[in-house]
Amino acid sequence: MLSNSCSLSILVARTDIPFMMHTIPHLVRMSNFNFIERVLCMDTAPLSGDKVMRPGIGTLSDLRDCCNTLISEGIVDKVVDINYDQTYQQKMYQKHFGSPIKPTHNYKGYPILGSIFHIESVPGDYVLHYDSDMLLHQEADYSWIDEGMKLMEQHPEIMAIRPLTGPPTKDGTIYQQNKPLKPEAGGFYKFKFFSSRVYLINRKRFDKLLPLPVLWRSYKKKFLNQLPLSLRTILNYYTGKGKLDSWEIMVSMKLEKTNYVRASMSSPKAWTIHPKDRSPEFIRALPDIIEKIEKGWYPLEQAGHYDLISKYWL
């Protein structure tokens, strides 16, 4: 019997303020699923890496006001702050990495501990995560979450699943790094690389993937890069100087060493788009873009492409 208990968990930070009041209600509305909980996990840590340069950064008070508004409007159920207590961090890193590591964010300023926290802090057999800037279309008579769960039950090699990447093309082609890919039998594409922007996971199955390898950015002193990974991890723990790479790359590295895959569904009934644009022009146009996507409209030039191509929308 298929279990459909699932929580929605979305990371939010001060960098999301320009668009989150449009995108989060849209994502919840389009998902159209009876979640156990709809949770916003708030990153209260100081900004670092390239996040410092993002446009439209507000204050933590502004962010908390946005979250409270989404609660009062019934869009989400609650907001929880990422737990930066050292005891909690050590416990979670031991489980997910098998190593004591100090950085809470990667070299870009993306929350590594937060990526773990927002999985561990919600109930349910399944956890669904969207990055707060994602856009989603889903037909009214369809549930990509239900279908995704069914596919995961039928295919135990699927570690994580998500909807079609980009609006559909006539022949089912999608483009990954400008390379065309055709759909496989079974209703999904298989990948050995993971994306943290959208994923549905079965919590128990994900736990079987752990621990993940700890991946560090290259040192300026090149000879240090030749050290075994475990030794570099110990060195960075005691010096506090190492910079972590991306969590999704660590998950990808583990997928490469196992029989698990990340799946993208091939059904044209649900699809996602990732906007890279943060310009004032795009933010102004965002409500109109969301309205079009919810209706299923998109420029023909966008078909099969995952990243939103602004010149065809604005």
Image (cartoon, rainbow, N blue to C red):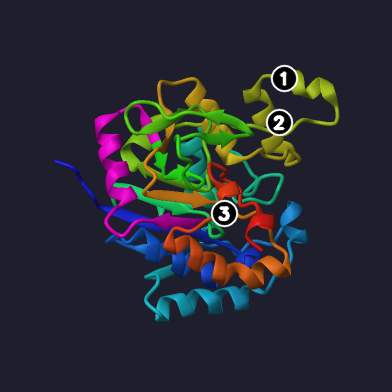
How far apart in space, not on screen, are marks 3 and 1 (Cα)? 49 Å
Of 179 and 263, which appears nearest the observer? Answer: 179
Residue projecting furthest to the right = 221
Foreground label between 2 and 1:
1
Q: Write down the residue under mark 3.
A: 299
Q: Amino acid at mark 1?
A: Leu
Q: Write down the residue under mark 2.
A: 235
Residue 50 in the image: state x and y as whole percent.
75, 53
Q: Are marks 2 and 1 in contact (CB under 8 Å)?
A: yes
Extent of the magenta region: 135-159
Give the image quarter of residue 52: bottom right
Q: Callout 1: 10 Å neighbours few (<14), some, many (20+)?
A: few
Query: In the drawing, what numbered circle is on residue 294?
Result: none
Residue 181 in the image: state x and y as whole percent.
52, 29
Q: Amino acid at mark 3?
A: Pro
Vertical order, 9 against 29 (above or below): above
Of 161 and 126, which appears nearest the observer? Answer: 161
Give the image quarter of residue 85: bottom right
Marks counted in the figure total 3
Of 272 and 302, which appears nearest the observer? Answer: 302
Vertical order, 121 against 175 (above or below): below
How far apart in space, not on screen, are marks 2 and 1 (Cα)? 10 Å
Residue at 53% across, 72% down: 21
